Image: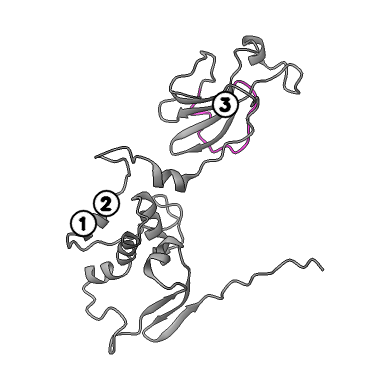
Amino acid sequence: MIETKPPLADLPVFDRNFWDGSFSFTRIGTGSLGGKAGGLAFIGLSQVRESAVFSGIPITERLTAEERTCGVCVIDLRSGQVVALLRFETAVQEVFAVTVLPATDLFLMGREHAHSVPRGVAPAHRLCDHGVICSLATNNVLNPFTPFGDCSLIRIANLYANVAQLGEGRALCSCFDMVTRGPASLMNLSQYGVEVGNPADLVVLDCSEEAAAVAEIVQPLVAYKRGRRSFSRAQPLLHRPNYG
């Protein structure tokens, strides 16, 4: 059962300063912080039993067995307020971990909105449909403003498709255009593309179509700059188990 307000007044109080770091372990006591995602803290709540190894902790003295809730409490890290509570009313008595699916959440969240959909990214693909030159890129990589990344534009195109909730082939091709033809047009590269007489600047991807390159985050096999091979990537080798 999911509730928007906690049924108990004795749920743990969230101290933003104390939990400012990322904790991947469980803290035994008035609450257990199992992880943070999207500005939310997920706290596992268990029905501590007197016969269990953790009996005798303060919460067992303040709450009766009937009042102890097993479930997952969600706290807004910005305000410290409880925003949701998933309570198990039968069978489950202890929660050991919470697994979040960020890619699935990004692709599904906000679909109930008819307008002002909470995405955080401008829908550039819609502008492309009206002839606007658009491109996808990354700021810097591994710096204070973008502390992650590997300089892969295909990965950026995949991220955009996920956030913008684009899964259809034509839409994925539009994402591919925004890391290839779009930037070339933006920079007025008149000799862009595989044509006779054009500079031999190209990247070879291990896929048969543009949509697959974005959907699968296909890794480049080899790249050439003005006809000179600049790098190559060996294909992975599968080592099958030997049961003999």
Which one is in front, 239 or 88? 88
Q: Determine which residue is flagged by label 1.
A: 127
Mark 1 → mark 2, Cα distance in angstroms:
7 Å
- How many neighbours does mark 3 have within 10 angstroms: few (below 14), some (14-19), or many (20 or more)? many
Which one is in front, 200 or 178? 178
As shown in the figure, which amino acid type bears the numbered disc 1? Leu
Q: Which secondary structure class fits the magenta region best?
A: loop
Q: Is residue 57 above or below residue 172?
A: above
Give the residue displayed 75% in from the left and 22% down from the top.
52
> Is the Cβ of the residue at disc 2 closer than 8 Å to that at disc 3?
no
Residue 27 is one of the magenta-drawn residues? yes
Which sits earlier in the primary sequence, circle 1 or circle 3?
Answer: 3
As shown in the figure, which amino acid type bears the numbered disc 2? Pro
Secondary structure of the residue carrying tag 3 is strand
As shown in the figure, which amino acid type bears the numbered disc 3? Gly
Give the residue displayed 29% in from the left and 85% down from the top.
195
Q: Which mark is residue 82?
A: none
Q: Give residue 88's quadrant in the image.
A: top right
Q: Position of residue 13 (x, y in %)?
A: 51, 20
Q: Give residue 28's quadrant in the image.
A: top right
Q: Which residues are magenta?
A: 14-30
Q: Position of residue 152 (x, y in %)?
A: 42, 64
Question: Would residue 102 be found to the left or right of residue 168 on screen?
Answer: right
Q: Position of residue 143 (x, y in %)?
A: 43, 54
Q: Which mark is residue 71?
A: 3
> Is the Cβ of the residue at disc 1 closer than 8 Å to that at disc 2?
yes
